Image (cartoon, rainbow, N blue to C red):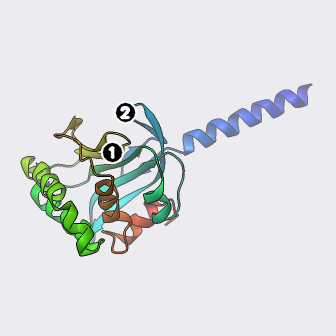
């Protein structure tokens, strides 16, 4: 009986340690092991840092309904998804919007990109309206089935949802596409150890 009690205590400790270890600390930014996207629980798939030359620009965390290790799995997965970004340095928001637009264009064929131009322009305008993002400022890009893509900056949803399902995947390709913003960040978002 004593052995069973010891085993239960050890098993409970292992489970608690495992759940605590699922949270990630990335350059001082804590990414919880799970998030709530409009009532749907999603889990942290991976998180990392976006570098520009030697400078840390922001951290990013990808939340999905279940773990995925390839871009194709992530893009094809049904259900709610979230990309969470936390700034590590001050950046001109309109410049970030332009970089995101370029990242979408660099990871799609021209015909597919041309269909998304109105959404890309609206997304760029969202960032332009903010002027600048400072360290610890954050934004989320959520895919909500039946609703669309919602961009939330500093806790406030920005305008109407982007209805096209392709728009969210186009945004994800900035980080997970064949020409990602940062290869190490791509691996980190896909849960691959550095």
Q: Residue at x 54, y 48 (%)?
A: 66
Q: Is residue 113 left or right of residue 46?
A: left
Classify residue 109 by image quadrant: bottom left
Q: Is residue 14 left or right of residue 23?
A: right
Question: Mark 1, residues whose alpha carbon is within 10 Å: few (<14), some, or many (≥20)?
Answer: many
Q: Residue at x 32, y 54 (%)?
A: 168
164 is higher (above) or lower (below) than 2: below
Q: Secondary structure at mark 2?
A: loop
Classify residue 158 by image quadrant: top left
Chain-order first, disc 1 or disc 2: 2
Q: Secondary structure at mark 1?
A: strand
Where is mark 1, residue-wise? 142
Quadrant where the image shows the N terminus: top right
Where is mark 2, residue-wise? 38
- Along the viewing direction, whichever of 39 and 10 lies nearer the viewer: 39
41 is higher (above) or lower (below) than 92: above
Distance from the alpha carbon under mark 1 to that under mark 2:
9 Å
């Amino acid at each position: 009986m004593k052995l069973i009690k010891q085993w239960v205590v050890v098993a409970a400790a292992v489970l608690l340690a495992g759940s605590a270890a699922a949270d990630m600390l990335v350059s001082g930014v804590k990414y919880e092991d799970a998030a709530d996207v409009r009532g749907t629980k999603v889990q942290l798939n991976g998180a990392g840092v976006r570098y520009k030359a030697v400078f840390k620009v922001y951290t990013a965390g990808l939340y999905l309904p279940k773990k995925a290790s390839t871009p194709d799995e992530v893009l094809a997965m049904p259900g709610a998804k979230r990309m969470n970004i936390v700034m590590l340095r001050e950046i001109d928001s309109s410049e970030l919007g332009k970089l995101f637009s370029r990242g979408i264009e660099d990871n799609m064929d021209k015909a597919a990109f041309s269909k998304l131009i109105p959404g890309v322009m609206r997304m760029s305008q969202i960032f332009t309206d903010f002027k600048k993002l400072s360290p610890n400022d954050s934004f989320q890009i959520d895919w909500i089935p039946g609703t669309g893509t919602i961009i939330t900056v500093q806790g406030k949803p920005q305008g109407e949802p982007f209805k096209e399902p392709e728009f969210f995947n186009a945004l994800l390709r900035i980080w997970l596409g064949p020409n990602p913003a940062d290869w190490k960040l791509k691996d980190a978002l896909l849960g691959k150890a550095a």
